[in-house]
Image (cartoon, grey):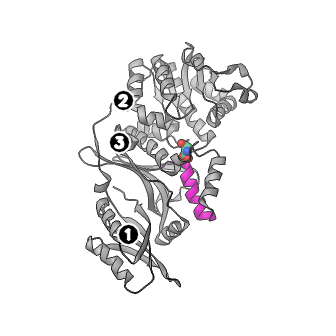
Amino acid sequence: MIEIGLIGFGNVGQDIYRILNENGSLISKRIGRPLIIKRIAVRSPEKYSNLITDPSLLTTDVNDILNDPNISIVVEVIGGEIPALDYITTALTNKKHVVTANKEVISKHKKHFFKMAHTNGVDICFEAAVGGGIPIIRALKVGFAANKIKAFYGIINGTTNYILTKIKDEKKEFNTVLKQAQDLGFAELDPTMDISGLDAAYKCSILAAVAFKLDSQVNEIVHKGIESITLKDLNYATELGYAIRLLAQGKQLESNEFELQVCPSLIPLNHPLASVHNEFNAVYVVGDQVGEAMLMGKGAGGSPTASAIISDIIDISFGISQQTSSRNLETNFQDGQIKPLNKTMSQYYLRINVKNEPGVLEQVSLQFAEQSISIEKIIQKESNTNIAEIVIITNTIEHQNFIEVETALSNLKQCNKVESSIRLYKTL
Ligand code: HSE
């Protein structure tokens, strides 16, 4: 028998319990022995006792799990850095395998955890930390293991993808749609983590660890959220042949230099990532042998996340049965530099609010010419007021160059405001 201890019993924890009940005999048959939840650690057992058949599984003392010699797999689903860091560290020290959905703690402490797991001869698995139900970690660790991964492009935050889709398709207000995402259980406790791109940045650093063996921290990943994206931008993007998605990108350049960033991006409508809607996530991987591949699925919500967690539990159980462990292929990190944002290259979309008077377009295009930036596309609609709107797509330029033109435009007396600026998806 394989015994599991569950720390946390929110949406995801409850779905793990449900799935192990519903598909328990199938799962036990697959791993060749029974798999049972032995204890569930929660703060307030009274809130959960009517949700499970045997309320005596509930405990308020996490040590009932961490110190139980019969529990071989600890599943952490409380989220956040503290106290998850302590619980995982103790579990690994006590030679227990760990499964977690916690992107923050994995992103911040992966090096420490992988080393500890290796030293103690156990595994730490985190499939659910990125892309919810999509098996992207296993795909990168095993499925694409023959490849040098050149790049990944991920829509890895369900809440923001849901918001962008609903604003565009249903013309709903930002806050209305955010509330819907919260009600559906996608959003973080503090939704600014989703909106600001921080959640995706944690996941981006985890993908970089698995894809490139690079130990990056979120403060090294430039991240921009979707706060300033409006229905107008989404509509202009469609008119120009693009969708707007919050995209996490990782690219391996030459001589161990990497590009890592999270920002809204214009993606050509004929690219597979442009057809990823609502809370769906997708990761588009470019490998030197496999070429281009995309995995897509539900990236948020209890059931898909629990599905990924149970896949890790099953994988570890196979290891226990075969008496193998410590299969973390990403234990050995490589040295690498992250390219400063200012030096990265991209095309840019700009929406500028200007005075509706003669000579404005000339002044605007002069700012681009002075920076030797070529304008690839431009839209200006008829306006009956004293305000006009100009939308521009530049050619590929260095970010620093873009900042200079953006500043010059903001200082232009005919320009009321640079309303938005968005990078375009750029393949390697
Ligand atoms: N808040 C996250 C999202 C949940 O919206 O994608 C999954 O990590």
Q: Quadrant of ligand 1?
A: top right
Question: Residue at label 3?
Answer: 147
Quarter the N terminus occupies: top right
Of helix, strand and loop, which one carries label 2? Answer: loop
Left-right relation of 224 to 64: left
Which residue is drawn at the image coordinates 40% and 42% (left, top)? 218
Calculate the distance from the C-alpha at mark 2 to the C-alpha at mark 3. Answer: 17 Å
| Mark 3: amino acid | Asn
Earlier along the polypeptide chain: callout 2 or callout 1?
2
Query: Taking 103 as reference, is 315 above or below it?
Result: above
Q: Residue 240: x, y in percent? A: 46, 71
Residue behind mark 1: 410
Residue 305: which quarter of the image?
top right
- The stretch of residues the image draws in magenta is 155-171
Quadrant of the image for the C terminus?
A: bottom left
Q: Is residue 327 above or below residue 403?
A: above
Please tell me which residue lies in front, 292 or 244.
244
Which residue is the site of mark 2? 331
The residue tagged with tag 1: helix, strand or loop? Answer: helix
Residue 351, by quadrant, is bottom left
How far across and how far down the image is residue 332, in percent?
A: 33, 30
Ligand 1 within 8 Å of the CB at mark 2: no
Identify whether 191 is placed above or below 405. Answer: above
Residue at 33% of width from left, 62% of height from top?
403
Tell me if 322 is positioned left or right of 183 in this view.
left
Give the x, y percent position of residue 5. Answer: 59, 22
Of residue 26 and residue 76, the one placed in the foreground of this image is 76
